[in-house]
């Protein structure tokens, strides 16, 4: 039985199913990126638990975490790709979908390696509550991303993914996109942070920020504005230098989706031991 997967074909199939005319802004790309991120962002470097291996979101324990609300859409969109490539793991599919989506939406090429395996039950699924809360600030970001092994600057770089997609009142409670063209990967998010003034939005929903001149549509979370306090110079650099942002983002996203991946589990160890070696002269 061959275990081979044609990853170039998988990439093409992911790109094709990004097109979803009736969904959000017409693309599943942003929600694929969030699926990849949430699959990996449970990692804890001290206990070596969580991370992108396992595809634990298939189980209620992780999939039902309120932080993951809405990601079932991404998983359903990707189901035909999984069905077509029988030896493809869900954990590889979800991380690759994030990479393909970023590339297809005009972002940088990101290194991606296969070899994640899927849990067969929920015993190794990480506990809920490991993902960040947009209503909090820099101390919280440092605690959550520090647990994964990321620095302040890496948090700022990773947050550039908020160039994509939007908040949904029925998922997170927050509402609206960060930028005007939420299906194009760019450094616009940093320009909005650098050049616009953000004030608490007047509404009955959870605390988020708006800009009067832009109307109430575009938004920032508390955690987005916290980046300016963590390293304003880096936010400004990315606003002015798209290439620098793309280069750094490609590296840090590749690091994110490797968290918790142990290829030894999958039999990817260098040279398999031959049982008849033992005792040979
Ligand atoms: Zn997000 N993110 N995120 N993020 N995110 C949302 C949407 C998206 C935080 C957060 O609370 C939220 C990263 C970091 C952080 C994406 C990618 C990445 C939403 C809206 C919230 C509330 C969810 C909804 O209502 O559908 C917080 C607090 C973060 C800490 C810094 C990182 C890192 C990301 C990838 C590298 C993306 C692509 C979306 C848009 C999803 C969509 O469905 O459009």
Image (cartoon, helix red, strand yellow):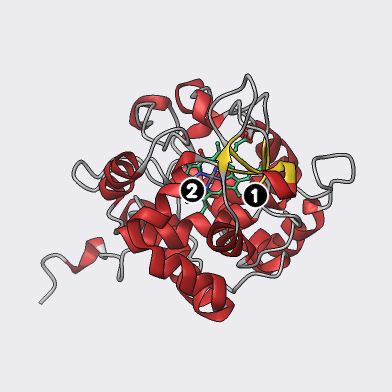
Would residue 152 appear left or right of 237 to someone viewing this image? left
Mark 1 closeness class: few <14, some 14–19, many ≥20 residues within 10 Å: many
Residue 83 at what x, y percent from top left? Answer: 71, 44
Which of the 4 image quarters holds residue 99? bottom right
Pick the residue in front: 123 or 253: 253
User: Callout 1: helix, strand or loop?
Assistant: loop
Ligand 1's quadrant: top right
Above or below: residue 259 compared with residue 75: below
Q: Residue at x 33, y 54 (%)?
A: 262
Would residue 163 appear left or right of 24 to someone viewing this image? left
Residue 89 visible somewhere in the drawing: no
**Residue placed under numbered mark 1 in the picture:** 178
First in sequence, mark 2 or 1: give its number: 1
Residue 163 at what x, y percent from top left? Answer: 63, 57
Q: Are marks 2 and 1 in contact (CB under 8 Å)?
A: yes
Mark 2 closeness class: few <14, some 14–19, many ≥20 residues within 10 Å: many
Q: Residue at x 41, y 54 (%)?
A: 227
Q: Using the numbered discs, state the Cα–Cα distance from disc 2 to disc 1 in whole angstroms.
A: 10 Å
Above or below: residue 226 compared with residue 173: below
Pick the residue in front: 22 or 241: 241
Mark 2 C-beta closer than 8 Å to ligand 1: yes
Would residue 114 appear left or right of 259 to someone viewing this image? right
Q: Residue at x 45, y 63 (%)?
A: 157
User: Callout 2: helix, strand or loop?
Assistant: helix
Pick the residue in front: 228 or 189: 228
Q: Residue at x 58, y 62 (%)?
A: 195
Q: Which mark is residue 224?
A: 2
């Amino acid at each position: 039985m061959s275990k081979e997967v044609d990853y170039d074909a998988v990439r093409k199939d992911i790109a094709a199913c990004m097109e979803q005319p009736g969904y959000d802004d017409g693309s599943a790309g942003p929600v694929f990126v969030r699926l990849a991120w949430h699959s990996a962002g449970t990692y804890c470097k001290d206990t070596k638990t969580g991370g992108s291996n396992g595809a634990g979101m298939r189980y209620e324990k992780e999939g039902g975490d309120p932080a993951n609300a809405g990601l079932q859409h991404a998983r359903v969109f990707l189901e035909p790709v999984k069905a077509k490539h029988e030896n493809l793991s869900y954990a590889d599919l979800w991380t690759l979908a994030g990479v393909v989506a970023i590339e297809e939406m005009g972002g940088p090429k990101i290194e991606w390696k296969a070899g994640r395996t899927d849990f067969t039950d929920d015993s190794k699924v990480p506990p809920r509550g490991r993902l960040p809360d947009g209503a909090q600030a820099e101390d919280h970001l440092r605690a959550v991303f520090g647990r994964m092994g990321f620095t302040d600057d890496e948090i700022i770089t990773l947050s550039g993914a908020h160039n994509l997609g939007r908040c949904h009142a029925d998922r997170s409670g927050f509402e609206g996109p960060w930028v005007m063209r939420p299906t194009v990967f760019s450094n616009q998010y940093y320009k909005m942070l650098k050049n616009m003034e953000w004030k608490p939005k007047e509404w009955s929903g959870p605390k988020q920020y708006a800009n009067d001149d832009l109307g109430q549509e575009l938004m920032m979370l508390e955690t987005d504005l916290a980046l300016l306090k963590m390293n304003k110079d880096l936010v400004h650099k990315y606003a002015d230098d798209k290439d620098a942002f793309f280069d750094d983002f490609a590296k840090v996203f590749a690091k994110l989706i490797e968290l918790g991946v142990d290829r030894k589990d999958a039999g990817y160890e260098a040279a398999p031991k031959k049982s008849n070696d033992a005792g040979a002269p």
